[in-house]
Image (spheres, rainbow, N blue to C red):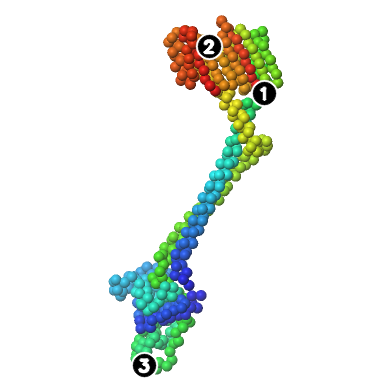
């Protein structure tokens, strides 16, 4: 009957233990939820990143965009070689305004620039451009 | 359960006790003050509120009194008792912690005292004017052959808990208060815990929707491989374009681009400037844009270079 002597303490202790266990349950739920959410959020971010990067650097409409570069400068000033997913283009005697347009177009097209050489010859420019996608 | 326990009559002249199990005790009028009043109140709690005023002048000033209130026909019966003094007496008589379950007062069993109840060889409990009183045996005359057998059948329904004799740190009031607070917090933590469990569901659903759209990206290994590949491409190509953008911002009146070369590792450019002042301005801009600047043999010409 010793427990009867300390029944008040035992009741308070029981309630305290219940509170502590519920607190641990909450903390556990919180940390496991935060870990799970972190994992899921990371996966979502990675997928979104892959999708965005692929959309940019593996653009399905890239051929159309390349075609726009091709028609920018008159064919008489250009030598255009297209092989699979590679382009080698050489331009001669292009004016500064044409050079501006060409460079802006190239830079705005999502291709991997392997080489871009520009050289001023008198009042015009000579350009060599190699890219792939 | 409590009423089936042994009932012990406690009086001033009692012998010391040594108990093996808890008992209920009944106190003789030596331990309480009784007052009966006809009051215009309906409930016991209302009567209890005015109890102290009723006993004014009857109780010792230094005592700490509690009141037990009950109704006997039209009258309200007030029993004033000092639990500290009762506890001290019980300790003195050998009662230990946990020995006393409930405390009752003789007056509570007034209707059961049909005969005199002897408490020792000199005194007995008897009923006088519906009140249990302690009288000397001499006052009863010579006929004391028929006496009341004191046992648990005299146990009243309602008793008082004896807190003072236990070694509890907490009183019952504090116990209830603390327990309620802890239980309230327990409930709050539990509900909060449940809520956290449900929150991750929406993000999981979003992920599942993406997996449905892009089944090939379900594997983290595949994803990492693709991300690494495109991240490298993105970084290198952005660096090339960024370098050209910076170089183009250095072309203004008096500055001519004479050559530009971009490959996988470097971006190089040559500028021809019309004056020393302009060349200096280009040089400052180039240095600010993290380009390495070198002066060429030609007057006011600059060679700019940056590693990707």
Q: What separation in Å lies between label 1 and label 2 (alpha carbons)? A: 33 Å
Chain letter of mark 1 equals A
Q: Are marks 1 and 2 in contact (CB under 8 Å)?
A: no
Badge 1 element: loop
Disc nearest the viewer among 1 and 3? 1
Marks 1 and 2: which is nearer the front? 2
Residue receiving disc 1? A61
Q: Answer whether residue B156 is visible to the viewer in this image.
A: no
Determine the chain carrying the residue at label 3.
B
Note whether B111 is above or below B218 in the view shown.
below
Q: Is residue B9 left or right of residue B251?
A: left
Q: Residue furthest bottom?
A: B142
Along the polypeptide, which appears first: circle 2 or circle 3?
Answer: 3
Crowding near the residue tagged with mark 2, few <14, some 14–19, many ≥20 C-alpha atoms within 10 Å: many
- Taking the spot 39% from the left edge, 94% from the top edge, the residue there is B143
Relative side of B86 to B258, left or right: left
- Kindly tell me whether residue A28 is visible in this rendering: yes
Q: Which residue is mark 3?
A: B141
Residue with the most extreme right position: A84
- Nearest the camera: B55 or A91? A91
Report the mark closest to the observer, 2 or 3.
2
How far is the residue under mark 2 from the one under mark 3? Answer: 140 Å
Q: Position of residue B112 (x, y in %)?
A: 45, 83
* Mark 3 surroundings within 10 Å by alpha-carbon count, few (fewer than 14), some (14 through 19), many (20 or more): few
């Amino acid at each position: 009957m010793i427990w009867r002597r300390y029944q008040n303490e035992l009741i308070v202790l029981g309630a305290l233990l219940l509170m502590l266990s519920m607190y641990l349950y909450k903390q556990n739920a919180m940390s496991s939820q935060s870990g799970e959410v972190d994992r899921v959020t990371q996966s979502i971010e990675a997928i979104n990143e892959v999708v965005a990067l692929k959309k940019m650097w593996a653009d399905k409409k890239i051929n159309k965009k390349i075609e726009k570069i091709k028609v920018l400068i008159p064919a008489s000033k250009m030598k255009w070689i297209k092989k699979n997913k590679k382009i080698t283009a050489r331009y001669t005697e292009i004016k500064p305004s044409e050079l501006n347009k060409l460079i802006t177009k190239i830079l705005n097209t999502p291709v991997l620039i392997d080489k871009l050489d520009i050289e001023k010859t008198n009042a015009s420019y000579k350009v060599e451009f190699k890219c792939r996608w | 359960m409590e009423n089936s326990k042994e009932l012990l009559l406690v009086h001033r002249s009692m012998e010391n006790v040594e108990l093996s199990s808890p008992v209920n005790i009944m106190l003789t009028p030596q331990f309480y003050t009784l007052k009966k009043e006809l009051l215009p109140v309906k409930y016991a709690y209302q009567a209890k509120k005015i109890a102290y005023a009723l006993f004014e002048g009857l109780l010792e000033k230094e005592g700490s009194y509690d009141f037990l209130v009950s109704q006997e026909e039209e009258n309200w019966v007030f029993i004033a008792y000092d639990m500290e003094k009762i506890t001290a007496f019980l300790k003195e008589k050998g009662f230990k912690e946990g020995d006393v379950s409930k405390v009752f007062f003789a007056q509570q069993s007034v209707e059961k005292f049909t005969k005199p109840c002897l408490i020792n060889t000199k005194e007995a409990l008897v009923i006088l004017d519906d009140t249990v009183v302690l009288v000397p045996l001499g006052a009863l005359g010579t006929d004391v052959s028929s006496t009341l057998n004191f046992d648990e059948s005299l146990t009243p329904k309602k008793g008082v808990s004896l807190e003072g004799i236990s070694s509890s740190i907490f009183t019952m009031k504090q116990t209830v208060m603390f327990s309620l607070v802890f239980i309230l917090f327990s409930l709050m933590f539990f509900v909060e815990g449940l809520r956290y469990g449900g929150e991750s569901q929406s993000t999981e659903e979003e992920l599942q929707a993406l997996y449905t759209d892009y089944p090939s990206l379900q594997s983290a290994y595949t994803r990492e491989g693709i991300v690494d590949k495109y991240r490298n491409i993105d970084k290198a190509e952005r660096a090339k374009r960024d370098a050209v953008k910076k170089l183009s911002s250095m072309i203004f009146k008096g500055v001519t681009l004479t050559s530009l070369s971009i490959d996988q590792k470097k971006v190089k450019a040559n500028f021809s400037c019309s004056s020393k002042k302009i060349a200096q301005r280009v040089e400052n801009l180039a240095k600010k844009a993290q380009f390495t600047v070198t002066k060429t043999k030609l007057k006011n010409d600059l060679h700019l270079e940056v590693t990707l």
